[in-house]
Image (cartoon, rainbow, N blue to C red):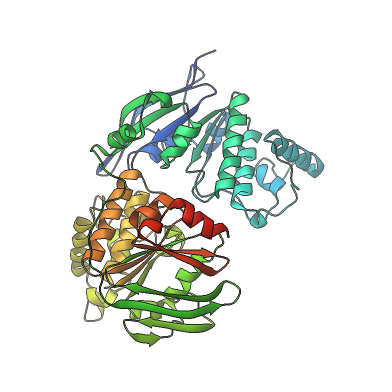
Amino acid sequence: MNEFVLEMKGITKTFPGVVALDQVSFSVKRGEVHALVGENGAGKSTLMKILNGVYQANHGEIWLDGQKVHLSNIKDAQSKGISIIFQEFNLINTLSVAENIFLGRYNDEKLINWKEVRTEAKRLLESLGFSFDVNRIVGKLSTAEKQLVEIAKALSFQAKLIVMDEPTSSLTKTEEEMLFGIIRKLKENNITTIYISHKLEEVFRICDTVTILRDGKVIDVKPVKEIMRNEIIEKMVGRTIDMDYPKRNVQFGEIVLDIKQLNRGRLLHDISFQLRKGEILGIAGLVGSGRTELAETLFGAEKADSGEINVFGKRVVLRSTRDGQMNSIGMLTEDRKETGLVLPFTVARNITITNLKEVTSNLLLSGRKEKKVAEKYIEALNIKTPSTNQPLMNLSGGNQQKVVLAKWLFSNADLLILDEPTRGIDVGAKYEFYCMMNDLVAQGKSIIMISSELPEVLGMSDRILVMHNGMIKGELMGLQMTAENVMQLAID
């Protein structure tokens, strides 16, 4: 039997104006967990879409188990034992677990034996070490349980190679441990995993080999035990990053936000704090602690039941996001694709959408003005795009995130709420984003940053508020800002 379950040889893929993959060779040994890392836009997703039959390469070959194959579509890839679990799950929330696992496997001419379907679905879940009711509706499952259903669905195709794309991006630490246990179980059963993640600590915990891509080319392939974290980062970004979190020295100004005894149903209780000009205020807490609910209320997406919101010394009532914007507040939402961007629109339109009056002439949108504005922010934020007219869906996650930031900068927002601002973007893009945050506060903007990544909160914040059960449990400054102190308040 061939040592390699997968060999992709000399893969080249071009799009108009872009070489996405340039002579990429990628080989994966049978039964290993193989990490595929690189900056957003490095070519990881394109390579995996070719493996899954979504794209066809312009040049190159794919070999499975020593046999050359042609993968013309997703079903073709599945029939050859390849399954991809994307960051956005491919499940139907209104159907049951069993129905989702075997969706599309039956036609109208065949009478479905539902007892057999449920029995097989139960067996697949039990093979992963879990047993729960396969009649449950998927929409009522947790994120971790949905991921389990996706893995069971992959196994139902007799998958020998499973690709996991950012599998822990929405998981709690407990759920992450559950996932790692499943991956180890797959490995014991000689099933190969390609693991795509921006979280390098996961690569070192769970993976055997790492392939590093940059600008559509393979930079290096090494056993994980033979490479250091800093070496991976340098090869990913093509430069040395001296520190994870760039330092700054900013003098804080006047109070720009003053919150007094804010309440919202059962979600927020007696919230009081202040934010100063030029400050980055971190908000930490476990999932469900009320962080996002607080951000929504401060932006006007949800209305508070009681309490005071004072912006730049003026008491305001925020009933809508329009109210938030009118009071110079902008928000990068946790899910940029669902609530932060209009993916089919162009880069230019996404940047100008919050302030269209500035790019109109005689009540008509001016393409010339819109293009000029977009070019300004593309240059300022180093957004990688072939043109201002590029549909936003074609940009990498990190560049999409920069477009969200550009949108709010163009709206002249002075107070920015960043909810999980670096989720799903790579190490190099994170560093650029942190530098942009520092530049913004140096210009007099103020930032509230919510993040589940504790090192990020500790590394970027001037002060940290820790939330638990909808309340602020404590405030940390200076030497008090340690992981131990944050966690003690977060779980109390």
Give x and y (percent) for residue 20: 31, 38
Q: Where the C terminus falls, by quadrant?
A: bottom right
Q: Can see residue 187?
A: yes
Front residue of 335/315: it is 315
Above or below: residue 442 compared with residue 43 = below
How far across and down, in percent of the image, does residue 406 sit?
28, 63
Up/down of 470 relative to 394, above or below: below
**Closest to the observer: 192 or 318?**
318
Of all residues, the one furthest to the front in this rendering is: 479
Q: Residue furthest bottom?
A: 315
In-image side of 114 versus 275 (left or right) = right
Residue at x-position 22% and y-position 64%: 442
Q: Residue at x 40, y 56 (%)?
A: 457
Q: Position of residue 448 (x, y in %)?
A: 37, 66
Which quarter of the picture shows residue 331? bottom left
Q: Is residue 482 above or below residue 315?
A: above
| Residue at (69% x, 41% y) in the render | 106
The quadrant of the picture occupied by the N terminus is: top right
Q: Residue 3: x percent and y percent?
A: 49, 15
Horizontal placement of 275 versus 381: left or right? right
> Looking at the image, can residue 9 be seen?
no
- Residue at the location (66% across, 35% down)? 156
Of the pair 216 and 280, the residue shown nearer to us: 280
